[in-house]
Image (cartoon, coloured by chain):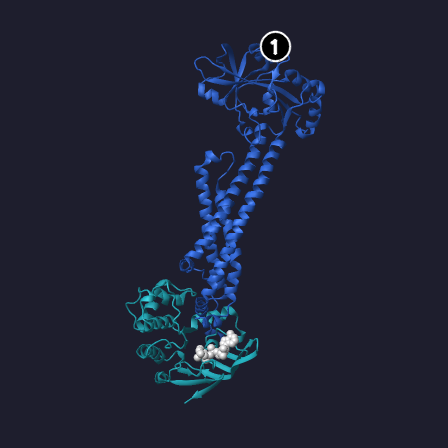
């Protein structure tokens, strides 16, 4: 099976006043469809940096990232944007919902930069809301939701257009264990559909029971945990 | 292998009104402030355009109403009015045989059946050729009419309409019968007021009579009679400005005692208007530029603050597949929304004020029209793009991964 995403010798460093800080060192990994991977590691170890590279929002300093075997360093900005909007879904720790829009409008924002028929996008958005258990919440304003519900809106937005790769950076970071469990079950169901790869960053080791693979970062070095 | 990559869609998604509206709505105070400053600038700009265009058409009106190549000679306003004489007209005729010369005298008279006094203008036969008014019916005076002191009258179209006179009718002026032989279309209202001299106006309702008749019919004298104005039209190939110095030399000879004269040619009328245009352009223009720069910088700072506050949203948009261009367009559209609203508000309010207070402002020849609507709005689009360009670029350059860290 071909990986969706493959890192070969990827490192990422930042130039700062005091010199070069290497945040990721020689990362080599393949991510396959159907995997639900948890990424753990201490704060500052490079998890978010890795996730942004996976979501094609950032570029490696050295090495190459292959998306469907295509080296992404050779892709134009337009093609990268296209990949991002068609194939990648993102879930954020702070939910990142637009405050002046309803739940449904927030999910529809997934299609903001896509040319799609509006009846079609509405159908997809409603389906996504149903999948995260938020039927009937369509016209609610986002301030009327609990944290868990907001995060599920965030997930619905990420999966409204079925992504090939779903990245979630600490999606349960602001939630209590019950809400976190609900969000994790959502993601787990999604992963069970088989054709989508999920990358989840978390500090909570108890969530590992939902995931099928465990990656760990330590000071920029990636290790696979059994 | 590339088949699994979606192809680049050529269609651009324009920033939606929703996006703009959200940006406005989330910071109403800031938006209102820059809108206010811009609106004032746009109002001043509209005024400027209305004035400049009005002055431009006034200058065209002036030269067409005086005649394109005519010199009018009048006593200076404060001088004794009755010191130009018919003999001076004669003097000019002798010295400038190719030019047409006519003396003019204004009086008023009542006609039977009404107590309304009419403006009677005593002219020579060349007067109509000088002013180049169209003959609508009948004919003008000719030389023999003047020599024979015929009691003929030429009336303006408006009089004809008001009094229901016709060519061939006889009218009584100061109890003397005059036969109407012609009707003329006269228009010279623009010659009065700021830029011309009210004595150049004969008015829309005037009766023209031969100057030779008038001398007997009015208080008669010895053939050297006072006149109110002199008109000279040089031959068409000689510009008035070229004849002017010679005329001035001739009439200011010491023994004629004619120093205090106004010399009016279309060029000098237009010069007055152009001067006014220059003054208006500079002062009102400076105010407009000041207001617009002020409004524009307020707008820029508004957008810079917006970009800073909305970094997470920018990150989200990039994660949803927005290109750098999409992000730049979003902020440019917000900037343009502010300036175009200001353009519409400013321009409309000036239209309202000018239309309402026209009587009060009539000293200034405002001209409203499609130009005072469309020009400010077109200008506001350019300004919006200009002043939002820099914040939009800086928003577009924000790296999406960094933007999401601000979440
Ligand atoms: N733009 C940047 N410039 C310089 N250093 C950066 C930049 N972005 C991240 N870093 C550094 O890279 C390191 C890794 O950051 P990263 O956000 O990937 O950590 P993390 O594992 O996600 O931590 P946390 O669990 O706290 O979210 C940090 O030390 C951080 O300071
Ligand atoms: Mg992180």
Residue B161 x %, y %: 45, 21
Q: Nearer the viewer, residue A80 or B91?
A: B91
- The cyan-tinted chain is A
Give me the residue at 63% from left, 32% from top. Answer: B267
Residue B54 x %, y %: 53, 37
Up-down: is B168 above or below B73? above
Question: Label 1 is found on which chain of the structure?
Answer: B
Q: Quadrant of residue B235?
A: top right
Q: Quadrant of ligand 2?
A: bottom left
Residue A200 x %, y %: 40, 79
Badge 1 local density, few (<14 within 10 Å), some, or many (20+)?
A: few
Residue B10, visible in the rendered structure: no
Q: Residue furthest left?
A: A136
Q: Nearer the viewer, residue A144 or B237?
A: A144
Total tally of numbered discs in the picture: 1
Residue B214 x %, y %: 57, 13
Up-down: is B156 above or below A119? above
Q: Which residue is mark 1?
A: B221
Give me the residue at 48% from left, 52% from top. Answer: B339
Q: Of helix, strand and loop, which one carries label 1?
A: loop
- The blue-tinted chain is B
């Amino acid at each position: 099976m071909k990986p969706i995403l493959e890192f070969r010798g990827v490192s990422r460093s930042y130039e700062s006043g005091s010199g070069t800080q290497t945040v990721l060192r020689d990362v080599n990994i393949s991510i396959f469809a159907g995997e639900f991977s948890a990424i753990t590691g201490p704060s500052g170890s490079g998890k978010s940096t890795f996730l942004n590279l996976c979501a094609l929002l950032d570029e490696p300093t050295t090495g190459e990232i292959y998306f469907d075997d295509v080296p992404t360093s050779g892709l134009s900005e337009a093609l990268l944007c296209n990949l991002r909007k068609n194939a990648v879904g993102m879930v954020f720790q702070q939910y990142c919902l637009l405050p002046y829009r309803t739940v449904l409008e927030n999910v529809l924002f997934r299609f903001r930069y896509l040319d799609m028929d509006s009846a079609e996008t509405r159908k997809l958005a409603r389906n996504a809301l149903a999948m995260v258990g938020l039927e009937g919440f369509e016209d609610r304003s986002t301030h009327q939701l609990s944290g868990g519900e907001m995060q599920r809106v965030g997930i619905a937005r990420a999966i409204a257009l079925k992504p090939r790769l779903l990245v979630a950076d600490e999606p349960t970071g602001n939630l209590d264990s019950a809400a976190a469990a609900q969000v994790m079950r959502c993601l787990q169901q999604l992963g069970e559909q088989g054709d989508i790869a999920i990358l989840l960053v978390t500090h909570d080791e108890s969530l590992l029971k939902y995931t099928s693979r465990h990656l760990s970062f330590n000071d920029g070095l990636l290790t696979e945990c059994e | 292998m590339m088949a699994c990559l979606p192809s680049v869609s050529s269609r651009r998604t324009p920033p939606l009104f929703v996006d703009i509206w959200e940006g406005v709505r989330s910071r109403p105070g800031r938006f209102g402030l820059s809108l206010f400053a811009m609106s004032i600038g746009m109002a001043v700009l509209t005024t400027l355009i209305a004035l400049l265009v009005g002055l431009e058409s006034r200058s065209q009106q002036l030269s067409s109403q005086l005649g394109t190549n005519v010199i009018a000679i009048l006593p200076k306003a404060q001088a004794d009015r009755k010191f130009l004489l018919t003999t001076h007209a004669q003097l000019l005729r002798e010295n400038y045989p190719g030019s047409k010369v006519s003396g003019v005298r204004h009086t008023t008279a009542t006609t039977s059946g009404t107590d309304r006094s009419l403006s009677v203008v005593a002219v020579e036969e060349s007067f109509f050729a000088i002013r180049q008014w169209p003959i609508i019916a009948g004919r003008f005076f000719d030389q023999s009419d003047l020599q024979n002191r015929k009691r003929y009258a030429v009336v303006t179209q408006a009089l004809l309409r008001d009094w229901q006179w016709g060519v061939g009718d006889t009218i009584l002026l100061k109890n003397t019968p005059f036969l109407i032989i012609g009707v003329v279309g006269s228009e010279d209202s623009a010659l009065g007021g700021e830029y011309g001299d009210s004595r150049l106006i004969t008015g829309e309702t005037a009766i023209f009579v031969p100057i030779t008749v008038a001398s007997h019919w009015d208080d008669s004298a010895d053939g050297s009679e006072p006149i109110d104005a002199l008109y000279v039209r040089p031959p068409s190939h000689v510009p008035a400005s070229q004849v002017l110095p010679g005329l001035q030399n001739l009439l200011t000879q010491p023994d004629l005692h004619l120093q205090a004269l106004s010399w009016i040619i279309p060029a000098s009328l237009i010069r007055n208007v152009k001067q006014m245009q220059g003054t208006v352009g500079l002062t009102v223009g400076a105010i407009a530029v000041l207001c617009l720069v002020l409004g524009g910088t307020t707008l820029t700072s508004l957008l810079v603050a917006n970009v800073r506050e909305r970094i997470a949203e920018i990150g989200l948009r990039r994660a949803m597949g927005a290109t750098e261009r999409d992000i730049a367009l979003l902020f440019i559209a917000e900037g343009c929304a502010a300036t175009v609203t200001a353009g519409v508000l400013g321009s409309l309010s000036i239209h309202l004020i000018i239309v309402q207070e026209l009587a009060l402002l009539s000293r200034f020849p405002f001209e409203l029209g499609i130009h005072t609507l469309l020009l400010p709005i077109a200008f506001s689009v350019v300004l919006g793009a200009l002043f939002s360009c820099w914040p939009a670029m800086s928003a577009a350059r924000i790296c999406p991964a960094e933007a999401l860290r601000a979440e």
